[in-house]
Image (spheres, rainbow, N blue to C red):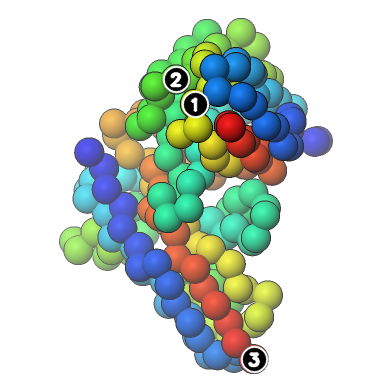
Amino acid sequence: NAGVTQTPKFQVLKTGQSMTLQCAQDMNHEYMSWYRQDPGMGLRLIHYSVGAGITDQGEVPNGYNVSRSTTEDFPLRLLSAAPSQTSVYFCASSYSQGDGYTFGSGTRLTVV
Amino acid sequence: GEDVEQSLFLSVREGDSSVINCTYTDSSSTYLYWYKQEPGAGLQLLTYIFSNMDMKQDQRLTVLLNKKDKHLSLRIADTQTGDSAIYFCALRGNQAGTALIFGKGTTLSVSS
């Protein structure tokens, strides 16, 4: 098993550009989430999904879109990048409600 | 909304015990977790406890849960320099469905 795979690992965007952060898991996990990590802020939930076709907003969803067409993939789309979206983004997945989440290695995004 | 609080820093000497504390507001949280993040890395699940438990021990790690005071702690026995990292308390908050809500993290510094 590869676990949770995030691509790219690093990305620099210009303000106003759009892009998609990829997240894939091969563990047949139903639950997937996206977090952003900023210094002194911990991890904040952006969007999450409880299965294919089902997504919901977390604490900081503005400026981001998600979709879940398959169990394996949960991409995060930045619609029009802003400097405030400079952050490290983590994708995570979980098999069941009682299991802990497995995290990917993160995508470090800089918006200039 | 759900609030998870942690002290930001803890400094200990190698061989001492470390105790990292966490308080939370949602008394209905069922699953509580401790994650470790080393510099530049993703999050690693260390241990977890269910709300119907008071204590869980796993080798050098001891988790204590005081549901009345909504207080969770992680004790690391015989702390080593390799334990230096950021430790996050996380729980399943009702308002986020099955996704995790994180504290801001406690940076543990271990000196030799």
Q: Secondary structure at mark 3?
A: loop
Foreground pick, A112 / B45:
A112
Residue corresponding to mark 3: B112
Q: Nearer the viewer, mark 3 or mark 2?
A: 2
Residue A80 higher or lower than A29, as above or below = above
Report how many numbered discs are placed on residues in the image. 3
**To which quarter of the image does residue A5 belong?**
top right
What amino acid type should be assigned to the residue bearing mark 3? Ser
Q: Tell me whether marks 3 and 1 sit on the same chain.
A: no
Residue at 29%, 31% in the rendered image: B95
Give the Cα distance between marks 1 and 2. Answer: 9 Å
* Residue B34 visible here: no
Q: Amino acid at mark 1?
A: Ala
Indicate the secondary structure of the residue bearing disc 1: loop
Q: Residues within 10 Å of mark 1 (few under 14, many from 20)?
A: some
Q: Nearer the viewer, mark 3 or mark 1?
A: 1
Residue B82 locus on image (x, y percent):
68, 75
Instruction: In the rendered structure, find residue A82 and report the number of the disc placed on it.
Output: 1
Q: Which residue is mark 2?
A: A63
Q: Tell me the residue at 72%/37% (across/down).
A: A10
Q: Are marks 1 and 2 on the same chain?
A: yes
Q: Is residue B11 left or right of residue A14?
A: left
Give, as a three-letter code, the residue at label 2.
Gly
Relative depth, front residue between B107 and B51: B107
Label 3 CA crowd tier, 10 Å (few <14, some 14–19, many 20+): few
- Is residue A81 rendered to the left or right of residue B20? right
